[in-house]
Amino acid sequence: MRGVPGGGGRGTRRCGAVRCVMERARGRRSPMMTAILERLSTLSLSGPQLSRLPRLLEDGFPKMPCTVQEGEVPQLFREPYIHTGYRPTGQDWRYYFLSLFQKHNEVVNVWTHLLAALAVLLRFKAFVEGEQLPLDAWSLPLLIFVLSSVTYLTCSLLAHLLQSKSELYHYTFYFVDYVGVSTYQYGSALAHFYYSSDQAWYDKFWLFFLPAAAFCGWLSCAGCCYAKYRYRRPYPIMRKMCQVIPAGLAFILDISPVAHRVIVCHLGGCEEDAAWYHTYQILFFLISAYFFSCPVPEKYFPGSCDIVGHAHQIFHTFLAICTLSQLEAICLDYKNRQEIFLKRHRPFSIYLSCISFFGLVACSAITAYILRCRIKAILAKKDS
């Protein structure tokens, strides 16, 4: 088609081309497609309309209450040297779930473990597809370990995401977090025992290692729950001891088969990839433990690390890297040490050990529930 003389020829050709498309569409497309093309042919966005687009998108989301300063939340929710970025209490549940996308002093804690949980699942999915993982006694401790890792990461992110709802839910979700920690401790012990231990270590400790690991896992949960229940802010040093000592004992026991293997390997000029990943696991855990125990750097820069950079966030980050290193090491051990595994263990003992995992979870959950009931009664008495 040609444009008429005297102006508008280019525009007429453009309109004519659109009409040609429309005519072809009417002949070959459905009425819905024809209507879409008609809308597109008349679509026009001006500069002012484009500039209003971000505001329109923002208005489409529900309004979120602003974060508040430490003086505007109860003492229970305040963290030392963190002055701002607290979420107000008493909001509906939707607010706390949507605060996943809000800037506040817990958001990095949530995202570090959310991303770590996704990374664990994706890495394990790739491993399963690559190794054609069977569902048998040989693979069961690995499955338990992955389940325990995802469980502790999920419990942790839920605690940090939802604990600001109220004082009762603050205690509830942190008790759930501690159950997740004990779950991860025993899941790690199972994987280290079955896949990663050397024969010299195994000959000495095989009889009592898993029962002791289960007890230390429960003790770690009980110690953390009791410390949370018993002590109020500002926390005394005894609270930290109730948390750190049982968890430290559990770590020393659970890591002992790996530590023995790493030391022997490095003394002999270590060339095992798995031993190196176990080394990284230990290193990253020790770094994370330091930041869990010490409020650094916010102690030296109070108010400057409220949103990003305070110790608990660094603790979360290194613990997540520790878990990913551990997963890599255990996957390598699973792939390369099957012959050792089959010589040592019978299916019945493996099934019994894995059943004890769920027994530990139940005992830890019952302990957390009992202390939650007690704290609920205390809070009810305080409010009456």
Image (cartoon, rainbow, N blue to C red):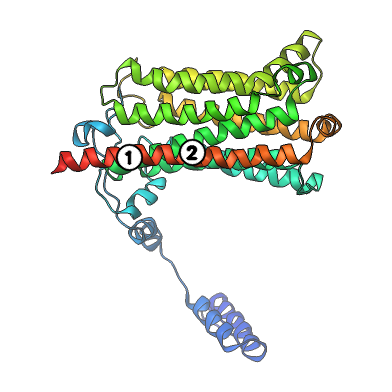
Residue most extreme to the left: 384
Q: Nearer the viewer, residue 209 or 120?
A: 209
Rendered view: 200 above or below 61: above
Mark 2–mark 1 distance (CA, rounded to whole Å): 21 Å
Residue 274 relative to residue 210: left or right = right
Q: Secondary structure at mark 2?
A: helix
| Mark 1 Cα-neighbour bin, 10 Å: few <14, some 14–19, many ≥20 | some
Query: Which quarter of the figure is the N terminus placed in?
Result: bottom right
Q: Give the SS element for disc 1.
A: helix
Q: Give the numbered dot on residue 93.
A: none
- The quarter of the image holding the C terminus is top left
Q: Which residue is mark 2?
A: 363
Q: Is residue 377 left or right of residue 2?
A: left
- Amino acid under disc 1: His
Closer mark to the observer between disc 2 and disc 1:
2
Q: Please state which of residues 59 and 267 is positioned toward the viewer in this rendering.
A: 267
Q: Amino acid at mark 2?
A: Cys
Rendered view: 181 above or below 212: below
Q: How far across and down, in percent of the image, does residue 303 sit?
A: 30, 24
* Total residue callouts: 2
Residue to which mark 1 is pinned? 170
